[in-house]
Image: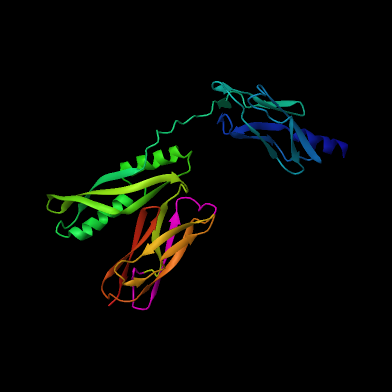
């Protein structure tokens, strides 16, 4: 029996020690994992740990692998490094030593210099609408959405720059708020089917919620068309959870073909919220339902059956 137990103990050799991430930066949490070649057959297996630079990689003196387990982990926070420094982390068990070799390093923290603050003012953007140039009102609606939209791929560069500057001006806690409606400045027909609109939006920049609207979509029914008296469900999502105290988005259906709540409140920590729209008139027409938060607007469409 003693020989059998001795054989089991011998089988428990140290297999490896790894660090994740392998390239850490100052202040980052690093997870160190040790592995045995077989499950621990003792009440516990204590693995000795050491670091070639304890000031930058202050690993614990040991890590314990529980009975019937093959691995265990410890974490530490990378210390200050003046330059990229390769550090060897070592593990010792039953006379066997394993190291991370040259695969682990710590670099100085990356310092991002924010752009200079930009005061509240006006955003001017140009939008080209591919459609019937005679339907100027519809095209103008698209242009105003383009200026106000929170979708990153629809943002004019002017809004992106102003938003980044507003964040920087308030230590990463900035909020753009539109003042008044989007103002139509001009429309030029570039050639048949393409109209170019110049639009303008005044805004203010202040400390506040740093998120904005991300998506607006119909979740039911499967068809985008509903009958008079029927309802459709919509989901509105933010790009990040609402802050303490929550945020309120405004809802509107300007044609009046459907009835919707006037507002949608996101409680602290909520990212998505649902509401229903009830068809009341306008058979054969399409209603565009707008959601507006901090000056940014998204829309979803719902059709009214004959």
Using the rendered image of the protein, determine whether residue 106 is visible from the camera's viewpoint: yes
Magenta region includes residue 227: yes
What range of the chain is rendered magenta? Answer: 223-244
Query: Who's the residue at 45% across and 62% down the image?
Result: 264
The quadrant of the rendering that contains the C terminus is: bottom left
Indicate how the structure is coloured in the image: rainbow
Place residue 248 in its image quadrant: bottom left
Residue 132 placed where, x, y %? 16, 58
Magenta region includes residue 179: no
The quadrant of the rendering that contains the N terminus is: top right
> Residue farthest to the left?
192
- Is 49 positioned to the left or the right of 228 in the image? right
Vertical arrangement, residue 117 with respect to residue 263, above or below: above
Residue 141 placed where, x, y %? 25, 58
Residue 197 placed where, x, y %? 20, 50
Query: Who's the residue at 75% across and 44% down the image?
Result: 68
Residue 157 placed where, x, y %? 31, 41
Instruction: In this rendered view, identify the residue nearer to me: 271 or 294.
Output: 294
Vertical arrangement, residue 303 with respect to residue 77, above or below: below
Instruction: In this rendered view, identify the residue nearer to me: 57 or 177.
Output: 177
Instruction: In this rendered view, identify the residue nearer to me: 50 or 169.
Output: 169
Using the rendered image of the protein, determine whether residue 103 is visible from the camera's viewpoint: no
Query: Who's the residue at 69% across and 39% down the image?
Result: 71
How many numbered badges does the structure rendering display?
0
Vertical arrangement, residue 12 with respect to residue 288, above or below: above
Instruction: In this rendered view, identify the residue nearer to me: 191 or 49.
Output: 191
Query: Who's the residue at 40% across and 36% down the image?
Result: 117
């Amino acid at each position: 029996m003693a020989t059998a137990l001795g054989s089991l103990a011998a089988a428990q050799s140290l297999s490896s020690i790894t660090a994740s991430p392998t390239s850490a930066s100052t202040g980052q949490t690093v997870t160190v994992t040790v592995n045995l070649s077989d499950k621990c057959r003792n009440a516990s297996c204590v693995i000795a740990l050491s670091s070639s630079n304890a000031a930058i990689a202050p690993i614990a003196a040991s890590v314990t692998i529980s009975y019937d387990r093959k691995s265990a982990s410890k974490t530490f926070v990378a210390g200050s490094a003046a330059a990229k420094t390769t550090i060897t982390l070592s593990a010792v068990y039953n006379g066997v030593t394993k190291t991370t070799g040259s695969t682990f390093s710590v670099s100085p923290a990356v310092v991002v210099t924010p752009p200079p603050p930009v005061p509240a003012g006006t955003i001017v953007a140009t939008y080209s609408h591919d459609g019937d140039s005679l339907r100027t009102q519809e095209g103008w609606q698209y242009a105003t959405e383009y200026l106000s939209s929170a979708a990153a791929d629809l943002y004019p560069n002017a809004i992106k720059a102003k938003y980044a500057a507003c964040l920087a001006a308030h230590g990463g806690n900035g909020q753009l708020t539109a003042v008044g409606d989007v103002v139509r400045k001009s429309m030029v027909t570039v050639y048949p089917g393409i109209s170019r609109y110049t639009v303008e939006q005044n805004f203010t920049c202040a400390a506040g919620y740093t998120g904005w609207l991300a998506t607006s979509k119909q979740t039911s029914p499967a068809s985008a068309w509903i009958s008079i008296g029927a309802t459709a469900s919509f989901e509105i999502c933010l790009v990040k959870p609402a802050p303490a105290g929550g945020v309120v988005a405004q809802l509107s259906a300007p044609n009046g073909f459907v009835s919707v709540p006037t507002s949608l409140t996101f409680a602290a920590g909520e990212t998505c919220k649902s509401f229903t729209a009830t068809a009341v008139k306008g058979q054969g027409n399409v209603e565009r339902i707008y959601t507006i938060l901090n000056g940014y607007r998204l829309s979803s469409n719902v059709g009214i059956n004959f």
